């Protein structure tokens, strides 16, 4: 019976590349590692800028339709103590049309404010929503 291995006992010369010659693979791995680190750094930078860039945020806790012309809105505002925040609240009628919108300013030197504000409407509202909050420039 004959053996399937070449006379030298190893792999055929030149058929499978250089033994231990993964030079091109090593270069690809290095490029992949650099790109991976750069991608993770970019994601971290976006996350930090998003968290630290938001100086004023709020949550609409509840609302109560007081009359055909008023809605009481309970807001919880979070901000830096030295920042003045402005939050916009909107109310909608049963048909989906907007019947009220107002900006409410929060200047208190506290970082968390619970407040009930009154939103005046042009017709009976069925809902209220927090549109958004921003920090006032110059504070």
Image: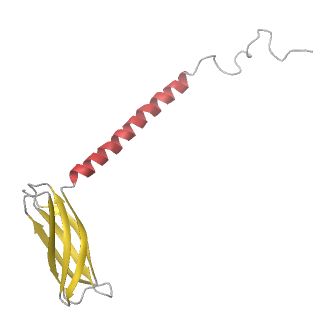
The number of numbered discs placed on residues in the rendered structure image is: 0
Relative height, residue 77 to residue 71 (above, below): above
Relative height, residue 98 to residue 137 (above, below): below
Q: Please provide percent x and percent y for residue 3.
A: 86, 15
Q: Residue farthest to the top?
A: 8
Q: Please provide percent x and percent y for residue 48.
A: 27, 46
Q: Please provide percent x and percent y for residue 24.
A: 54, 25
Position of residue 81 in the picture relative to residue 46 (left or right): left
Relative height, residue 60 to residue 51 (above, below): below
Q: Please provide percent x and percent y for residue 63.
A: 24, 77
Position of residue 73 in the picture relative to residue 23 (left or right): left
Tell me what residue is drawn at x 17 percent, y 88 percent.
Answer: 69
In the image, 14 versus 63, the foreground residue is: 63
Tell me what residue is drawn at x 13 percent, y 71 percent.
Answer: 104
Tell me what residue is drawn at x 23 percent, y 89 percent.
Answer: 124
Image quadrant occupied by the C terminus: bottom left
Tell me what residue is drawn at x 16 percent, y 76 percent.
Answer: 102
Question: Splitting the image into 4 quarters, where does residue 41 fall?
Answer: top left
Position of residue 30 in the picture relative to residue 77 (left or right): right
Question: Splitting the image into 4 quarters, where does residue 31 fall?
Answer: top left
């Amino acid at each position: 019976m004959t053996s399937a291995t070449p006379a030298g006992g190893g792999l055929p010369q030149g058929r499978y590349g250089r033994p231990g010659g993964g030079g091109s693979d090593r270069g690809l791995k290095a490029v992949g590692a650099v790109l991976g680190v750069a991608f993770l750094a970019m994601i971290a930078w976006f996350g930090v800028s998003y968290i630290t860039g938001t100086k004023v945020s709020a949550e609409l806790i509840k609302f109560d339709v007081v009359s055909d012309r008023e809605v009481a809105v309970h807001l919880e505002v979070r901000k830096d103590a030295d920042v003045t925040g402005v939050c916009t609240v909107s109310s909608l009628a049963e048909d989906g049309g907007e019947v009220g919108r107002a900006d409410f300013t929060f200047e208190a030197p506290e970082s968390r404010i619970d407040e009930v504000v009154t939103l005046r409407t042009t017709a009976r509202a069925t809902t209220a929503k927090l549109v958004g909050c921003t920090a006032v420039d110059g504070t």
